[in-house]
Image (cartoon, coloured by chain):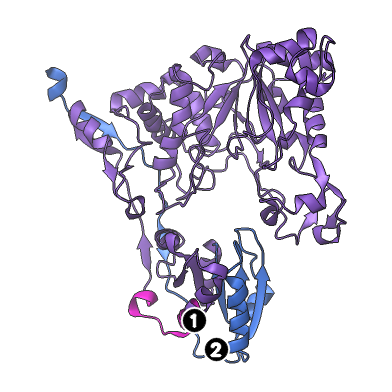
Chain colours: A blue, B purple
């Protein structure tokens, strides 16, 4: 009976989450024509085959660049490549 | 996600193409990495050939790059979740109900998901019980879990295409998928909940040092082997039914990784992590010890193989890819017939009928073992089989690893038909290790190892105490050793 009425303090098993600064998104492009848009292809690539083809066919005035890998971690742009890249489409792993 | 966050933060607009079942995880990860309003487009994983799906997502994908930002998307801020040290105050009965709580996750179709554990009943972590647990170590309760020595990470299915990192001594351990950290006391809370005793706490802290069974966020609670004298001190079962129920030490220690994955790592299925089926072998809890006393003369214990001393107690997480059901199986007596009198199925297979042993049992065991799986495996065997292998000529464990690995070679033409190499060779764009040449330049008859990158990382032999002559096996060889003694 005593144990039933006793108040126990019970501890928290959850780990420590560091605080995260939240950023706004980068400003969007005013148009696509004349821009360099990078295709970052990683993970299962099936959907990318028709997507890449159609992007290049339907938007010939965009300068399309790409890096492909089957691994789930994407190949990143170098600092030099970033200087000339206006936008990135990444899929399907992140 | 860190890459996408970095691009957005450096002024490059992005859009992510994801699959339907990943939406919740994308939302979660984008917050965790500081870009909570990251734009994404959802595709179906099951669209045939991907053509109609590609056409469907094309316009939304490009729109995400040019559509002006909303006020919400332009906003900054902070995400700072805080947890109290005392989670519940009340009677023990009410506390049991509290820790038994479940949450609802839409994709689990109404099946409850444990809020604080692995789904089994939990021991309530009262302040007194946690205090008692903390007496099992000399480390201070407020100390953060850090690496006690440098670790050069080994193994895993992506090793062929990904450079594995070296982690420095003193580095704070992050528990995945939420990159959380933990103190010794927080690990003690989880140890109490799993049903561990204070004398087992150094093992639990070592599990935490190794990542707490959280892996890259899909750790499944991990799977572990203990080497060294501590197994006897704390009463682990090292004998018959080593993978079965009955021994509270193997069971509690096997379970604690799953609880840490949930609490320290923040695992919530389809929300913070997306797995596939889990492992039918580990099933969320797997821990057993090695019986070094049963090793043949000259064979090293796992602790020595991993660079520790013979009398040091060590924990090794298993790089396990699941069960290893292919290859041969037999009744224990068939093995004894082989080695004693040269009779039975194994003797017929080896062509040694009528000739007493020792015979090369491994040649039989690995027949067809890579038929449907790649990579290496761990063999768990009783001391008699180990001694027979020694008597046959395997004077070291390394000679076994080398023998098995060499049997795994097959022509590139056949290797191309396998399921994993599309991934591990980076779509055949990578370099084949034994030749140093690009995969695409290799002739069809070039022989490559199916059974892992190298013998030591891919294979492992562990001896247990048992008179029966049977073996068990599961995927993965040697990974990294972590000192249990460092956490005493």
Q: Is residue B133 left or right of residue B472?
A: left
Q: Nearer the viewer, residue B131 or B325?
A: B325
Instruction: Read off the chain for label 1.
Output: B
B177 is higher (above) or lower (below) than B48: above
Magenta span dominant secondary structure: helix
Instruction: Measuring from the top left, give residue B307's x and y in whole percent.
Output: 71, 28
Are dots 2 and 1 in contact, CB under 8 Å? Answer: yes
Instruction: Read off the chain for label 2.
Output: A
Q: Give the range drawn in magenta.
A: B57-74
Write down the residue under mark 2: A32
Q: Which residue is drawn at 33% across and 49% down?
A: B82
Q: Is residue B283 visible?
A: yes
B447 is higher (above) or lower (below) than B306: below
How many numbered callouts?
2
B200 is higher (above) or lower (below) than B434: above
Q: Does the magenta stretch include residue B89?
A: no
Is the residue marked by circle 2 packed among few (<14), some (14-19), or many (20+) residues within 10 Å? some
Q: Is residue B14 visible?
A: no
Q: Nearer the viewer, residue B112 or B15?
A: B112
Instruction: Measuring from the top left, give residue B35's x and y in whole percent.
Output: 44, 67
Q: Does the magenta stretch include residue B73?
A: yes
Specify the quadrant of the image occupied by residue B80. bottom left
Write down the residue under mark 1: B65
Query: Element at badge 1?
Result: helix
């Amino acid at each position: 009976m005593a144990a039933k009425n006793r108040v126990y303090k019970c501890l928290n098993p959850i780990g420590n989450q560091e605080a995260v600064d939240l950023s706004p998104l980068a400003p969007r492009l005013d148009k696509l024509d004349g821009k360099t848009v990078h295709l970052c292809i990683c993970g299962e690539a099936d959907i990318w085959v028709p997507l890449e083809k159609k992007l290049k066919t339907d938007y010939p005035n965009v300068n399309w660049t790409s890096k492909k890998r089957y691994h789930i971690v994407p190949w990143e742009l170098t600092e030099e490549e970033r200087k000339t890249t206006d936008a990135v489409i990444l899929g399907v792993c992140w | 996600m860190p890459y996408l966050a970095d691009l957005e933060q450096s002024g490059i607009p992005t859009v992510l193409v994801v699959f339907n079942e990943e939406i919740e995880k994308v939302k979660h990860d984008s917050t965790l990495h500081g870009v909570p309003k990251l734009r994404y487009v959802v595709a179906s994983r099951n669209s045939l050939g991907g053509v109609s799906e590609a056409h469907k997502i094309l316009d939304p994908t490009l729109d995400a790059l040019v559509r002006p930002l909303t006020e919400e998307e332009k906003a900054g801020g902070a995400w700072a979740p805080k947890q109290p040290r005392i989670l519940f105050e009340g009677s023990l009965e009410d506390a049991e109900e509290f820790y038994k709580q479940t949450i609802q996750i839409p994709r689990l179709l109404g099946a409850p998901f444990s809020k604080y554990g692995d789904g089994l009943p939990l021991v309530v972590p009262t302040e007194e019980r946690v205090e008692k647990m903390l007496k099992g170590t000399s480390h201070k309760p407020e100390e953060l879990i850090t690496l006690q020595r440098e670790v050069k990470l080994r193994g895993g299915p992506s090793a062929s295409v990904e450079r594995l990192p070296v982690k420095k001594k003193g580095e704070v351990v992050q528990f995945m998928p939420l990159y959380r950290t933990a103190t010794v006391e927080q690990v003690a809370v989880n140890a109490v909940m799993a049903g561990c005793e204070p004398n087992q706490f150094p093992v639990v802290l070592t599990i935490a040092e190794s990542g707490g069974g959280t892996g890259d966020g899909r750790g499944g609670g991990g799977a572990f082997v203990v080497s060294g004298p501590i197994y006897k001190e704390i009463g682990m079962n090292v004998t018959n039914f080593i993978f079965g129920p009955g021994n509270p030490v193997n069971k509690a220690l096997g379970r604690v990784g799953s609880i840490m994955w949930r609490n320290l790592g923040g695992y919530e299925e389809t929300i913070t992590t997306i797995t596939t089926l889990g492992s039918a072998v580990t099933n969320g809890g797997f821990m057993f010890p090695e019986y070094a006393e049963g090793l043949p003369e000259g064979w090293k214990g796992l602790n020595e193989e991993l660079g520790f001393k013979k009398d040091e107690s060590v924990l090794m997480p298993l790089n396990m890819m699941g069960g290893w059901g292919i290859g041969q199986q037999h009744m224990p007596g068939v093995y004894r017939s082989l080695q004693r009198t040269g009779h039975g199925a194994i003797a017929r297979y080896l062509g040694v009928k009528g000739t007493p042993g020792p015979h090369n049992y491994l040649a039989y065991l690995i027949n067809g073992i890579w038929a449907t799986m790649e990579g290496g495996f761990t063999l768990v065997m009783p001391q008699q089989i180990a001694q027979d292998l020694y008597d046959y000529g395997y004077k070291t464990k390394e000679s076994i690893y080398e023998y098995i690995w060499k049997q795994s070679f097959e022509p590139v033409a056949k290797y191309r038909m396998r399921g994993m190499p599309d991934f591990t060779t980076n779509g055949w764009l990578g370099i084949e290790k034994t030749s140093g040449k690009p995969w695409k330049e290799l002739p069809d008859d070039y022989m490559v190892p199916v059974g892992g990158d190298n013998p030591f990382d891919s294979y492992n032999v562990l001896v247990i105490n048992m008179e029966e002559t049977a073996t068990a096996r599961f995927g993965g060889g040697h990974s990294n050793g972590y000192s249990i003694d460092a956490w005493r």
